[in-house]
């Protein structure tokens, strides 16, 4: 449970050239009704007005600055430099309801064996509230198999015991996207991911600088599943489920490559789908 002497929650906000929306995220973290917290903003080499914006908060937040290395490296730096026993991630284009942290802290107090939980979300797309589709419904508990097809955990919605990163590793800094999908699979194959069925996270999308819009996500999901299968940590049923999704994603990605004239790359992923191996990996 959250002890009196170690009850600090470290809020980690990575950002890169998001001065236009960062204030909303930071202000929502500062507005939390849970008092025992630290707020760490990791500036991933911004070249806009981010530094001036953050300077205005003075000692209300901690600011870490690194050269541009990507969101995974920024989150990892914040986690490594954090002082709390719990980590709450917040993307710089998202925000929280004022009782988000206190609600999750209460959950961990009531369930001391839990390692990670997330809240439900309010989705905003292009300035308008939208309803998630049925396939995006968040499960609770052992969520590994339903999480294979698409990411069912949102970074801004989770709170994690810091010690879980010692057990499962950090975010994969080689992934420009799907780094969260990769971590959640590594966690969820043997660790329950609990859901607080209250929308306490405001998730904003539709803007042009979202990383997911600039990369083929399935390519990195394929790599993530392959890494997990090769790690030999899955049960036989989990391995079969992972292999089925792996082959499906390989076929879909291969067909997309073929349609775009990338025949060599498409052939490689069709070969993976057929269960064959190759020494050469073609990048997008």
Image (tube, grey):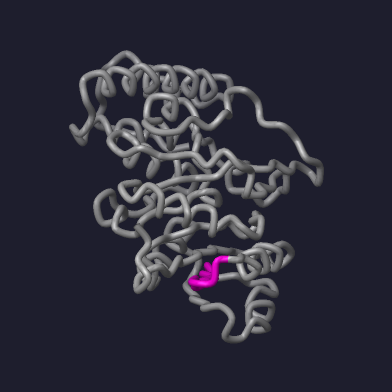
Magenta residues?
Answer: 34-44
Residue 242 is drawn in which quadrant? top left
Q: Which of 61 and 219 is in front in this view?
A: 61
Pick out the residue farthest to the left. Answer: 232
Please say if 120 is above or below 3.
Answer: above
Which residue is at the front of the view, 100 or 122? 100
221 on left or right of 60: left
For the point 40% across and 68% down, the residue is 7
Would residue 42 be counted in the magenta stretch? yes
Is 82 rendered above or below residue 202?
below
Q: Pinpoint residue 70: horizontal percent, then vertical percent.
A: 49, 58
Query: Residue 241 appears at what percent x and percent y?
Result: 33, 19
Is 176 magenta? The answer is no
Name the one closer to the observer, 186 or 263. 186
Q: For the point 49% across and 71% down, which residue is it?
A: 37
| Place of residue 22 in the rendered image (x, y in percent of width and height, measured from the top left) | 67, 65
Picture quadrant of residue 55: bottom right
142 lies left or right of 74: left
Q: Is residue 29 left or right of residue 12?
A: right
Residue 113 picture location, percent across and down: 30, 47
Q: Is residue 214 left or right of residue 188?
A: right
């Amino acid at each position: 449970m959250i002890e009196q002497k170690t009850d600090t929650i470290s809020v980690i906000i990575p950002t890169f050239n998001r001065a236009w929306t960062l204030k909303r995220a930071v202000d929502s973290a500062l507005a939390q009704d849970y008092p025992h917290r630290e707020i760490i903003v990791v500036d991933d080499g911004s070249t806009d007005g981010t530094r001036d914006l953050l300077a205005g908060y003075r000692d209300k937040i901690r600011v870490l600055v690194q050269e541009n290395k990507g969101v995974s490296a920024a989150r990892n730096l914040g986690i490594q430099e954090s002082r709390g026993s719990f980590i709450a991630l917040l993307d710089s284009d998202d925000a929280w309801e004022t009782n988000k942290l206190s609600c999750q802290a209460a959950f961990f107090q009531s369930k001391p064996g839990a390692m990670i939980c997330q809240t439900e979300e309010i989705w905003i797309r292009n300035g308008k509230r939208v309803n998630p589709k049925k396939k995006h419904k968040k499960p609770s508990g052992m969520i590994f198999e339903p999480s294979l097809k698409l990411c069912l955990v949102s970074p801004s919605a989770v709170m994690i015991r810091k010690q879980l990163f010692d057990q499962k590793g950090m975010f994969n800094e080689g992934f420009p996207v799907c780094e969260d999908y990769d971590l959640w699979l590594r966690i969820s194959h043997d660790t329950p991911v609990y859901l607080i069925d209250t929308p306490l996270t405001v998730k904003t999308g539709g803007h042009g600088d979202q990383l997911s819009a600039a990369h083929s996500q399935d390519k990195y999901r394929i790599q993530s599943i392959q890494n997990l299968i090769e790690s030999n940590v899955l049960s036989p049923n989990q391995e079969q489920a992972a292999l089925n999704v792996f082959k499906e994603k390989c076929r879909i990605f291969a067909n997309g490559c073929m349609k775009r004239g990338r025949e060599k790359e498409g052939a490689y992923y069709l070969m993976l789908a057929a269960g064959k191996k190759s020494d050469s990996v073609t990048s997008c």
